[in-house]
Amino acid sequence: MKHNNQLPNKLCKLLSEDSLIILLFHGVIDKQIDKVRNYTNKHIQKDLFAQCIKQLSNYGNPLSMDEVLFHLENKLPFPKHSFAITFDDGFENNLSIAAPILDEFNIPATIYVTSDFIDNNHMSWIDRIEYSVQNLAPSSFDFKWINQKILLDSNESRIEFLKQVRSFVKSEPSCNPNEFAIN
């Protein structure tokens, strides 16, 4: 979903009187400083996240994942306008930036942690590629998987390249994203 001032309203419109919605976030950042990384808006800016949480708390009924499980196991209907908040990948900013906002509005959340990221100080394959592409000096590369030379000399060309990488990795069943990120 696009990150703009309409996001809080859009999220509230997703809430239903007879079902639950689980909202998945990745990260919350103070502000967008990278020109290439986060081009997909995987990380939402703090002020907009706070607006979303405030509006959701005013309109909906937050549930923890334990409460969701309880309702499901006991075949109980969810309260009207129920929602649960989750975070994927367990970024540090989930605790340092998002948690205080959630706490302020008394909203439970579940953070799913990728243990390899912590145990071995790894980044996801796409984060590694985004980081590398953003920090490259302007260069031209031959890529076997797309059979063409690509000039990475602007933020726009870098983002277009990253879109091609995502598309290729996700559409090629034999591609191991972690190996792809190394090569």
Image (cartoon, grey):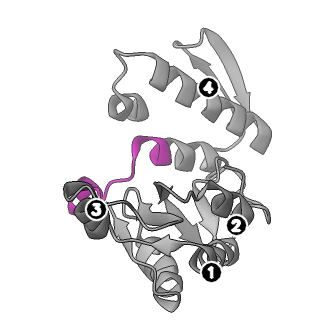
Q: Nearer the viewer, residue 177 or 45?
A: 45
* Mark seen at residue 164: 4
Q: Nearer the viewer, residue 93 or 158?
A: 93
Is 161 part of what is drawn in magenta? no
* Picture quadrant where residue 116 is located: bottom left
* Mark seen at residue 58: 1
Q: Residues within 10 Å of mark 2 (few under 14, many from 20)?
A: some
**Foreground mark, 3 or 2?**
3
- The residue drawn where x is 25% and y is 68% is 66
* Residues at marks 1 and 2, CA–CA distance in whole angstroms: 11 Å
Task: Verify CB contact (< 8 Å) between mark 1 and mark 2.
Answer: no
* Residues at marks 4 and 3, CA–CA distance in whole angstroms: 42 Å
- Residue where numbered disc 2 is placed: 8
The C terminus: image quadrant: top left
**Side of 36 where 131 appears, left or right:** left
How far from the left and from the top, in percent, is residue 173?
A: 37, 16
Residue 68 seen in the figure: yes
Q: Nearer the viewer, residue 50 or 166?
A: 50
